[in-house]
């Protein structure tokens, strides 16, 4: 048998509801956690795109301005090289946000712009798949969780001025980055030169999510405990206590046998109706018992005041009723003869009884005895003989035959 079966109704109910609540709370916590993580990811993508746009637009803007102003770049104006200025602008924007922004390449010109293994892999992927316009993922960077975003830079006409054949590049570029040391020449139009790479630390966001999750769990736990306590109280009030009261009421009625006892009830719920039904049943029983007692009393008055002796006995002769007149006739008290055999009152003269026991005798002679009034010899307590007029009748009650003898002393 499962140990659950022996628990009280209240415990079972609460256990089921507690498990259900726990399940829903856990489910909501897990869903919430995933939703928040997804939110962080979406936000990171959004911000990384913004920063990369800053880089791209800054480069385009500076590039245009230089063309319009017909500015010649030289070593002193290094910071005005579109890529350099856009890189520096986006780096400042990134620094403001706590991000790490770089423009990197696998074939770098400035070793500061060398792609790390992660970036190299992504740039290779950009080179292999021209349709790939951005790449992002959540990984680790220097031991901390980060969000990484890369967007490819493809060579347009303006780039080729400094990234195509080295002999076409401006003189200061050639001087700064001599052909033999530089890998960033000889690009074709549309070729991937490198990428803008953005690293967003998410450690703080994650710990915020964990904090939120912990707070939510605490709050849910408190709500959970309060709900369970409330539920326990409600079920105790609405179910367990009324049921216990009903049980006590029944036990008391069984103990005392008084049906007049009423079980108090509140409300018209199922248990209330059950108690009302039970009380009604008890009222009926009480009434039935009273009727029964009354008819018994009437019957006993009838038999006790009868002018004739009345003796009822079972088919084995056992006496079950012995009225006052019978007491007077035979000289026995009721107490003495109840349960004894009716043979006690038969005189030895009554030869037909002979050696037969009463049951056999009755079986054989009942027919004749009941058909008409008989004259028989009876025996008093003191052994003296009596002449009696006997009228015997047979009846059945509870599937048992019994006889009633009505006797008149005619001695
Ligand atoms: C005026 C010359 C010039 C032009 C035009 C130019 N670049 Fe560069 N590029 C440079 C120089 C100089 C560097 C090194 C920057 C540094 O020191 O950080 C560089 C660096 C880069 C880098 C960083 C990797 C590395 O090699 O150091 C990328 C990526 C890049 N350029 C892409 C482009 C693209 C794309 C264009 C066209 C939209 C472009 N460049 C146009 C001169 C130029």
Image: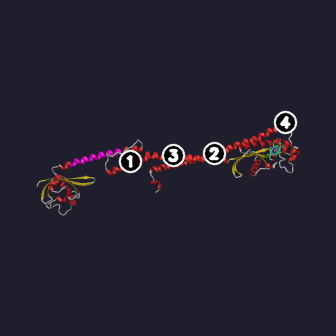
- Can residue 22 be seen here? The reply is yes
In the image, residue 299 lies in the stretch drawn in magenta = yes
- Can residue 374 be seen here? The reply is no
Q: Residue at x 53, y 47 (%)?
A: 224
Task: Describe the element under mark 2 as helix, strand or loop.
Answer: helix
Point out residue 379 in the picture as x, y percentages from the top left corner. Answer: 14, 59
- Marks 2 and 1, how far apart at CA: 52 Å
Magenta segment, prevailing SS (helix, strand or loop) = helix
Q: Do the residues labelled 2 and 3 touch (CB within 8 Å)?
A: no
Which residue is label 3 attached to? Answer: 226
Foreground disc of the pair 4, 3: 3
Point out residue 187 in the picture as x, y percentages from the top left corner. Answer: 83, 46
Which residue is label 1 attached to? Answer: 246
Which residue is label 4 attached to? Answer: 69
Foreground disc of the pair 3, 1: 3
Picture quarter with the C terminus: bottom left
User: Is residue 374 left or right of 121 when viewed as pictured?
Assistant: left
Would the CB of label 1 be found within 8 Å of ligand 1? no
In the image, residue 39 lies in the stretch drawn in magenta = no
- Image: magenta residue range: 278-300
């Amino acid at each position: 048998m499962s140990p659950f079966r022996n628990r009280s109704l209240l415990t079972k109910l609460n256990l089921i509801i507690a498990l259900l609540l726990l399940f829903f709370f856990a489910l909501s916590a897990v869903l919430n956690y995933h939703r928040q993580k997804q939110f962080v990811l979406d936000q990171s993508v959004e911000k990384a795109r913004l920063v990369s746009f800053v880089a791209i637009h800054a480069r385009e803007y500076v590039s245009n301005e230089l063309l319009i102003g017909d500015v010649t770049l030289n070593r002193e104006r290094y910071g005005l090289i579109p890529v350099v200025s856009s890189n520096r602008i986006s780096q400042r924007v990134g620094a403001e946000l706590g991000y790490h922004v770089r423009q990197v390449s696998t074939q770098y010109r400035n070793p500061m712009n060398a792609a790390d293994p992660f970036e190299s892999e992504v740039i290779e992927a950009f080179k292999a798949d021209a349709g790939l316009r951005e790449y992002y993922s959540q990984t680790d960077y220097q031991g901390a969780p980060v969000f990484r975003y890369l967007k490819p830079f493809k060579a347009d006409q303006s780039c080729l001025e400094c990234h195509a054949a080295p002999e076409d590049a401006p003189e200061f570029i050639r001087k700064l980055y001599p052909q033999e040391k530089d890998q960033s020449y000889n690009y074709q139009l549309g070729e991937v030169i490198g990428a803008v790479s953005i690293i967003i630390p998410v450690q703080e966001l994650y710990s915020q999510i964990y904090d939120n999750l912990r707070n939510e769990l605490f709050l849910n736990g408190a709500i959970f405990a309060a709900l369970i306590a409330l539920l326990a109280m409600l079920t105790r009030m609405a179910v367990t206590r009324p049921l216990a009261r009903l049980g006590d009421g029944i036990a008391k009625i069984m103990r005392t046998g008084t049906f007049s006892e009423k079980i108090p009830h509140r409300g018209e719920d199922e248990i209330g109706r059950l108690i009302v039904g039970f009380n009604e049943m008890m009222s009926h029983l009480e009434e039935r018992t009273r009727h029964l007692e009354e008819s018994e009393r009437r019957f006993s008055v009838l038999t006790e005041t009868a002018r004739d002796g009345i003796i009822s006995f079972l088919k084995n002769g056992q006496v079950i009723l012995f009225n006052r007149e019978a007491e007077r006739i035979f000289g026995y008290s009721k107490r003495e003869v109840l349960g004894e055999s009716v043979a006690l009152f038969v005189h030895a003269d009554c030869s037909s009884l002979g050696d037969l026991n009463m049951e056999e005798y009755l079986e054989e002679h009942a027919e004749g005895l009941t058909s008409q009034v008989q004259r028989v010899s009876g025996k008093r307590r003191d052994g003296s003989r009596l002449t009696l007029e006997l009228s015997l009748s047979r009846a059945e009650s509870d599937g048992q035959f019994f006889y009633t003898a009505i006797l008149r002393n005619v001695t």
